[in-house]
Image (tube, coloured by chain):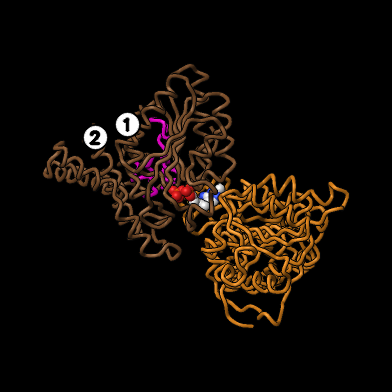
Chain colours: A orange, B brown
Amino acid sequence: MKETRYIFAIKEAMEEEMDRDENVFLIGEDVGLAGGSFGASKGLYEKFGPERVVDTPISELGFTSLAAGAASCGLRPIVEIMFMDFVTCAMDSIVNQIAKMRYMFGNQYTVPVVVRMPEGGGLNAGPQHSQCLEAWFAHVPGLKVVMAATPHDVKGLLKASIRDDNPVIFIENKTLHAMKGMAAEADEDVVLPLGKADVKLQGSDVTIVTASRMVHESLKAARILEQEGISAEVVDLMTIQPWDRKTVFDSVAKTHRLVVAHEAVKQFGFGAEIAAAAAEEILDELDAPVMRVGAPFAPASYSLEKYYVPSADDVVSAVKSTLERTL
Amino acid sequence: MLTGFYTMMVRIRKVEENLMEVFSRGEIPGFLHVSIGQEAAPAAVCAHLNANDCISTTHRGHGWAVAKGIEIRRAMAELFGKREGFCLGRSGSMHLADAGIGIMGANGIVGGGIPIAAGAAFAAQYKKTDHVAVATFGEGATGEGAFHEAMNFAAIRRLPMVFVCENNGWAEFSPKSVHMPVESVTSRALAYDIPAVSVSNKVVEIYEAAGEAVRRARKGKGPSLLEIRCDRWYGHYVGDAQKYRGKEKVEEAMAKDCIADFEAELIKGKVLRRKDLDRIRAEVSAEVEDAVNFARQCTYPDVSEMLEGLYV
Ligand SMILES: Cc1ncc(C[n+]2csc(CCOP(=O)(O)OP(=O)(O)O)c2C)c(N)n1
């Protein structure tokens, strides 16, 4: 293990996988010569050359489907979408093509594409540069959806996503890019399993299920709650689809209270799926209604971003209200 | 008219110089993309437009909004994220809009505004008015399907619009060669049988070419494309260190100044004297500084307003 930053961990994961498998290549806007808009591929162009680190015109739909075509012919593309907001330009590719190619063609094709993109606020970049759209992808059968919260996780999960034979939507977070933390060295080759959650903090009074940046806000909330004698368990889903029911439900069986926290707009977010699944499958374990934390039902605000994006305080309030209530 | 061009170009530059300054001081949040060095195109093209004509602009769109006649005080308030801004402080630089005079919005999505301008042209045609629409965009945007789809539709339906491409040679951090196999965007127009011309970054030259395109559109003869070959003086956004570009290339770009060139012509042609230029500059500076001070004194929207206005 060594100390690194989230953004370097992404680079290391791609580099190690490109070293390991010559079919892995990176494609996207300004990923090559410029080393990526956020610097995720710095040095890869120099090391692997323009054949494997491919700069594209501004054409998300075209290069994402191009990756799908290449993947179905044996390559393993990593597509970088500069901001998650721009993936909307590639929705046909991901939703109609990539997600369906295997099933629709009678399992003849495998399409091992990873589409990486950073989501979220933090830059005051306004309505078209701050969105969290993971729930859209989790709603489409055929895709896996991964969200990483730490340098260690982003590296291990990205390596796993690249090796996975299914299409993976790999969601990073802009405010985490600069985050420092430990991550595995190349020779350790840590590959984290997709579909497996990680209990980031053990607790006994309430389960907070979360992902990405909100993991850190939830941990902060847990520290605040601890001072009031409330013990929170923080479960980092890491994979949104397929999500780890067992870890979540085992935790709720212990705490009997559930809060789901994400940065995305609360309505129809992944929190809704988890709350509904808990109601369907483990209602008898719950002592109180499930509470959700998410952004308000409005586009991200430029000048009010700090009030728009959910924070530890929102998690604390949600935990308190579930503790005050009973079923 | 020549004085008008000069004043407008200076106004655009002053607005952006002031913006760079307040942005660097942290007074305005988010991203800031300036168009310094590219003032001639908006000043020239918008001289042919009136308040009924629509334009769609880009992330680098301050100049177009100013030239189309946006009230600078309220534009500045928007950039400061204040409630008195045109978008109620919700959106800032990347979405500057004034529906009242046909500024359909800057866009955070590259290419996003091009078909929207086509939609405005469609509405003008549908309602049998003589209004026109102008889509402004960079050469990088011509990689997007949205550009090609709008061109194709506009050509088929002879929409009253002008596609205006500011070809500044860079799209973010990569040169034109990464984005297009052709030298000029005019080659792209050929495929759609849309007449196209490419002009240098000289305000009078642009004015003449734009005049022909706008007249053609107004007469119902269909769309045209106008490419302006210009230079981006600064980085992609304010704060971009431009390592990918190198000092020499930056200096080369900055040596080309559409405003200084025009000043020299005005003096040589005895249209204006040095002291007239100074007066114009001083007046415009005062106007822009007043707008900055106005914006500073405006108020931020309240959190309680966040959910307002989402639906009619
Ligand atoms: C759909 C989409 N893809 C990518 C981006 C990121 N981006 C913003 S500006 C830009 C370059 C645009 O270049 P060009 O169209 O030439 O305009 P210029 O910046 O030179 O004015 C890119 C890639 C975006 N905003 N939207």
Instruction: Count the marks.
Output: 2
Give the quadrant of the N terminus of chain B. top left
Q: Main secondary structure of the magenta part?
A: loop
Quadrant of the image occupied by residue A96 = top right
Residue at mark 2 = B4
Counting residues from the N terminus, which is met first, the one under dot 1 or under dot 2? 2
Q: In the structure shown, which secondary structural element does the residue marked by tag 1 occupy?
A: loop
User: Mark 1 near mark 2, Cβ–Cβ under 8 Å?
Assistant: yes
Q: Looking at the picture, how far across and down is residue B51, in whole percent?
A: 37, 27
- Pick the residue in front: A49 or B293: A49
**Residue at the image point whose x is 26% and y is 46% from the top:** B259
Q: In the structure shown, which secondary structural element does the residue marked by tag 2 occupy?
A: helix
Mark 2, residues whose alpha carbon is within 10 Å: few (<14), some, or many (≥20)?
Answer: few
Residue at mark 1 = B47
Left or right placement of residue B263 versus residue B52 in this view: left
Examine the rendering and report whether any part of residue A322 can be seen: no
Q: Chain of mark 2?
A: B
Above or below B9: residue B25 = below
Is A114 magenta? The answer is no
- Three-letter code, disc 1: Ala
Name, please, the residue furthest toward the right.
A106
Above or below A203: residue B251 = above
Which portion, as a residue range, is magenta? B75-103
**Residue at the image point whose x is 14% and y is 43% from the top:** B279
Q: Looking at the picture, how far across and down is residue A66, in whole percent?
A: 69, 51
Examine the rendering and report whether any part of residue A118 can be seen: yes
- Three-letter code, disc 2: Gly
